[in-house]
Image (spheres, rainbow, N blue to C red):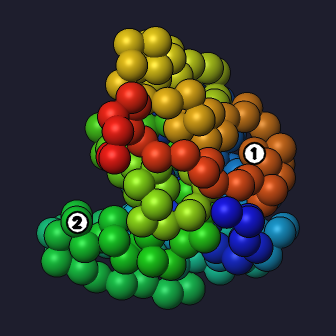
Amino acid sequence: MPHQALRSIAVFCGSNFGFSDAYREAAVSLGQEIAQRGLILVYGGTNKGLMGVLADTVLECGGSVSGVINRRLFERGHLHPHLTHHDVVDNMRERKARMASLADAFVALPGGLGTLEELFEAATLTQLGDHHKACGALNVRGFFDPMMAMLNLAVQEGFMKAEHRDMLVLDAQPGELLDRLTTWKAPNVTKWIDQPQA
């Protein structure tokens, strides 16, 4: 599939800060790159942790931020108060679907269960051809190296194709990551291995 121009990018990241200042610094750097390129940031809508740092940075740099927050977090007062636009949805499934509909590509910063789950869901939809959108991760302090080791094992053991492992774009530099996502092309292979008529 040919690549499409990036107008908006969904970023999945932690609602905590992590123990190293490098994570906060990476969120700032990515936010600056997003704003400077005129991209719309799509994210989970809160003011907590790296999510808040990222949104604050894009807004401070004159960029646009669209937040999608679930009703439970909204009612707890977690909505960032200065977003360009926000949606309140009923649950996490609707939140992810709405973010996916608004985004041309996906990036994960370091985070926990939710961040990893969101990245893998976006990548799975690309693998299945439900959308043709690039998925990447900002590999701060080698955070995503163990994830790639797990995917390497999945390839070695015959559970996924190398093309689907390789479609995930990892880079430690925000600018280079966004450049690579801009020129990314979806793999043109099915997910099934040695299964006729699959």
> Dot 1 corresponds to which residue?
177
Along the line of sight, which residue is nearer the eye, 19 or 112?
112
Please report the residue visible at 39 percent of the width from the left and 29 percent of the height from the top.
194
Q: Nearer the viewer, residue 153 or 52?
A: 153
Residue 88 higher or lower than 35, as above or below? below
Rendered image: mark on residue 117: none
Using the image, determine if residue 4 lies above or below residue 87.
Answer: above
Query: Which residue is painted at 50% across and 17% down in the image?
Result: 152
Find out whether the residues at labels 2 and 1 contact each other: C-beta distance under 8 Å.
no
Tell which residue pokes out farthest to the front in this image.
Answer: 196
Residue at 63% across, 21% down: 141
Q: CA distance from mark 2 to mark 1?
A: 27 Å
Toward the viewer: 125 or 193? 193
The spot of residue 117 in percent (x, y) is 33, 44
Secondary structure of the residue carrying tag 2 is helix
Q: Provide the secondary structure element on which disc 1 rests.
A: helix
Q: Which residue lies at the image location 28% right of the left edge and 82% below the top edge?
A: 88
Q: Mark 2 highlights which residue?
A: 93
Give how far across and how far down residue 34 sits, in percent.
Answer: 74, 63
Return the x and y of residue 127 as percentages of the image width and height: 46, 50
Q: Residues within 10 Å of mark 2 (few under 14, many from 20)?
A: few
